[in-house]
Amino acid sequence: MKMSANPFQACLDTILSPTVAFDTIKEKKGWSWLPFVLLTSSTFVLFLYYFNVVDFAWLKETMLNQAAASKPMTDDELKAIGSFYEKDTMLWTTAIGGTIGFIVINTLTAIYYHIATKVSASSEYKFTQWFAFTWWASFPAFVSVLLSTLVIFFSSDGMVSMQDLQPTSLNSLLFSVEPSNAWYSFLEAINLFTFWMIAVTSIGLGSWLNIDSKKSLIIAAAPQIFIFGGWALFLLFTA
C-alpha cells in the first residue's frame, strides 16, 4: 500500500491523492501540526497582505454603499458603521477573527465527527484524533488561500473587494447577484472548495472507519446540508 513519506508529502497527497494521505495519517496522527500551521498562518497572512495592498478608501466607500443598499439607514447609522471601517481595526479583527474562526469551526466539526461516527460507525477514535482529522480534511482551503493571494497580486489598482477573494463562489461563477439581494451572502458562502472539502472528508472517513462511500459521504455532507439547507429555507420564507 502506498504511503505518504512525511507530513509535507501528506499535505500534497491530501490534494492529489487523498486516499493515500488518509491511509497514512491514520497511523501518523502526530503529523496534523503541519496542516494546522499552514492553514492558520496562511489565513492570517492573507488578510495582512490584503489590507496592506487594497485601496482602503475605495474599500470603505464600497462597504458603506453595500451596507446602505442592504437596508435603509440614517446618516448617523452610516457614520457609526463607518467609524468601525478603519484600516487597522479591520486588518486585525479580520486577520485574527478569521484565524480563530477557522479553529472554532474545526473544533465544532471534530465534536460532530466524534459523536456521529461513534453512533453510526462504532468509531473508537477520540475527539483529539478527530480534531487532527479536520485539519487534513480542510486542507483544500490552503489552495483557496493561494488563489485569493493571486487575485490580490494581479490587481493593479488595489480595488479588490472581500468578495473578490472568493472567485469560486456560486455567486461569482453563476449568479452575480448584488449585495442588496437577500441571497447574496448565501451564494457567496458556497464555493467550489465547499464541495472539494466534502469529497476529501468523505474519502478520509472511508479510510479511517472502513465504511462504504455512500455512508461516508452522508456523514461528510450532513453539516453543510443542515447549515445551507436551513439557511436557504429561512431565505425562502423571509426574503
Image (cartoon, grey):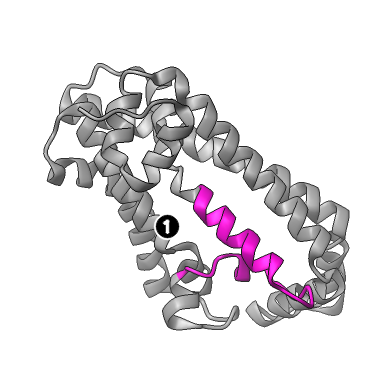
Percent across and percent down for residue 39 are 56, 40
Q: For residue 215, what is the image quadrant? A: top left
Q: Residue at 66% across / 78% down in the picture?
A: 71
Residue 185 forms part of the magenta stretch:
no
User: Which region shows up in magenta?
Assistant: 142-169
Q: Residue at 83% across / 59% down in the picture?
A: 52
Q: Judge left or right: residue 122 versus residue 7.
A: left
Percent across and percent down for residue 77 are 81, 71
Q: Say which element carries label 1.
A: helix
Q: Judge left or right: residue 27 versus residue 68.
A: left
Q: In this view, does 205 lie above or below 156?
A: above
Q: For residue 30, what is the image quadrant? A: top left
Residue 127: in sight, yes or no? yes
Circle 1 packing at 10 Å, graded few (<14), some (14-19), many (20+), is: some
Considering depth in this image, is 232 or 98 the residue closer to the camera? 98
Percent across and percent down for residue 78 are 82, 73
Q: Judge left or right: residue 199 versus residue 228.
A: left
Q: Residue at 48% across / 32% down in the picture?
A: 8
Q: For residue 232, what is the image quadrant? A: bottom left
Q: Residue at 59% across / 42% down in the picture?
A: 101
Percent across and percent down for residue 230 are 36, 59
Q: Name the residue under label 1.
A: 193
Residue 108: in sight, yes or no? no
